[in-house]
Image (cartoon, rainbow, N blue to C red):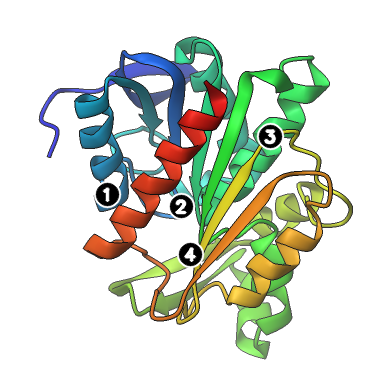
Amino acid sequence: MTETQPQILDVAGVPIAVRHREGREPGVMWLGGYRSDMRGTKAEALDTWAQKSGQAFLRHDYSGHGESGGIFRDGTISLWVEQSLAVFRAFAHGPQILVGSSMGAWVALRMIQALRETGKGGNIAGLLLLAPAPDFTSELIVPNLTAQHRRDLDEKGYFEEFSEYSPDYPNIYTRALIEDGEANRVMNGPVDTHCPIHIIQGIKDPDVPHTHALKLVSHLPADDVTLALVPDGDHRLSRPQDIAMILRAVEELTKQAD
């Protein structure tokens, strides 16, 4: 595990922790999932790979996550995209490959849309999406809300739900997150990234069904998309064989970008 202290980038008054490894282009930028952080198994494996290969590697924690400041319950997709764009603009140089895990895939797709609006979309050389969960609030949460969930959202502004990956600490979903998610939907029309995309999805993922990845592919008609379904893969995709597949995909994307 990396032991160095992160750099701190102030984004609208919130200290965002960043770890940046200098190296050759295209750089690789890690975008983590909901409640995950940049010291997780996949991010650390990518950092080790970048160190050995000489590739630039950039990662950060969203507000309320990991080593960053801020309050988790205050987080929304818009806020985390804004922070990720700030990190990108401050540290990323030259073409970049975005690696988005779960919610991080949604952040990556929104980043590309925002960058294209400012004429910077060409800076993205490729996408690697792991168990991608774009639009998860409207596609995966809202359709499964129970009566108790709805009461909690109305009365408390949030509801809690335990996951097999966090048996001691429940996931917290706020009304603000759900409402903001609706404004950030990407699978309500064609998604144009103008770069090659690799998607890795576990068939046995209990949180994001593989049909969600298939639906995402159907919204990527103009791009070169490779979809790898892992028959016994779960949501984390952190087993040695999963990590090996992820690193092969990153290497392939870097070769395509050269």
Residue annotated with mark 3: 195
Q: Residue at x 70, y 45 (%)?
A: 224
Q: Is residue 12 visible?
A: no
Task: Kindly check if marks 3 and 1 are in contact, taking CB atoms under 8 A apart as contact.
Answer: no
Disc 4, SS: strand
- Asked if residue 69 lies left or right of residue 101, the reply is left
Give neighbour class at mark 1: few <14, some 14-19, many 20+ (Cα, 10 Å): few
Task: Give the CA distance from mark 3 to mark 2.
Answer: 22 Å
Task: Give the CA distance from mark 1 to mark 2.
Answer: 10 Å
Disc 1, SS: loop
Nearer to me, 257 or 162 = 257
Q: Residue at x 56, y 18 (%)?
A: 95
Disc 3, SS: loop
Q: Nearer the viewer, mark 3 or mark 1?
A: 3
Task: Kindly check if marks 2 and 4 are in contact, taking CB atoms under 8 A apart as contact.
Answer: no
Task: Kindly check if marks 3 and 2 are in contact, taking CB atoms under 8 A apart as contact.
Answer: no
Residue annotated with mark 4: 172
Task: Kindly check if marks 1 and 2 are in contact, taking CB atoms under 8 A apart as contact.
Answer: no
Task: Give the CA distance from mark 1 to mark 4.
Answer: 20 Å
| x and y, in percent, of residue 106 in the image | 63, 49
